Image (cartoon, helix red, strand yellow):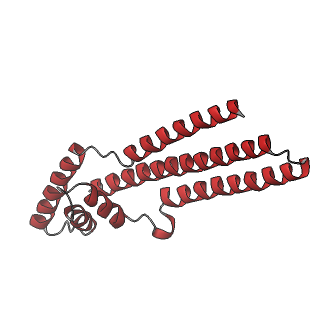
Amino acid sequence: MNNKISQYLNTFREIKSNSDLKVSLIRIHIVFLLVCTILIIIESLFYLQSENRLLAITYFGSIYLILLIYSGLKYFFNYNNLFNNNSYESIAKLIGQKSSSIKDRLINIYQLENKLNKKNEIEYELSVHAINQLKYELSDLAISFNINKIKFLLSRLYFILGISFILIILF
């Protein structure tokens, strides 16, 4: 048996990790753009001395880099399933929450796939049939994990970019 369900869960974990990384990067950039806009407005209203300006830029730049490194490490740990934070069982539960037609069957089939006994021929054939049946259902299921969330954050980012551009022009 080539662990069809495990391969599917692994693919879903990779998709989820990539999606989580994109969402966190978009959030970081939205906050960074807001902070930059606020700093530009403060600078246009009050003249900051070069020492204060350098200090503010250093602090916010450091925070920005730390958040980017944190997002990268989080992605690395989730993608490679280090510290078992994205186990197959948790991924199966997440997919079950997204699709009501699968629910607990995915977890059961995953556990069944891991405990296949080729010596008991009837049990093995029934297990393989159940695994293949769920695999076909999974292939028919189009998983769009966090796509709506990313689209929403991108629209928010474009809105903030537009407002920032207008504020920069005005001040």
In this view, 62 is above or below 44: below
Q: How many marks?
A: 0
In this view, 161 is above or below 95: above
State which quadrant residue 110 falls in. Answer: bottom left
* Left or right of 142, for residue 16: right
Q: Nearer the viewer, residue 42 or 11?
A: 42
Residue shown at 86% from the left, 53% from the top: 52
Residue shown at 84% from the left, 49% from the top: 53
Q: Nearer the viewer, residue 45 or 108?
A: 45
Query: In the rendering, at what x and y percent does residue 87 appear?
Result: 40, 65
Residue shown at 56% from the left, 48% from the top: 25
The quarter of the image holding the C terminus is top right
* Left or right of 51, for residue 5: left
The quarter of the image holding the N terminus is bottom left
**Residue ranking furthest to the left:** 122
Q: Nearer the viewer, residue 51 or 77?
A: 51
Query: In the rendering, at what x and y percent does residue 8 appear?
Result: 32, 52
Query: In the rendering, at what x and y percent does residue 77 appear?
Result: 53, 61
Residue shown at 50% from the left, 69% from the top: 83
Query: In the rendering, at what x and y percent does residue 102 appear?
Result: 19, 57
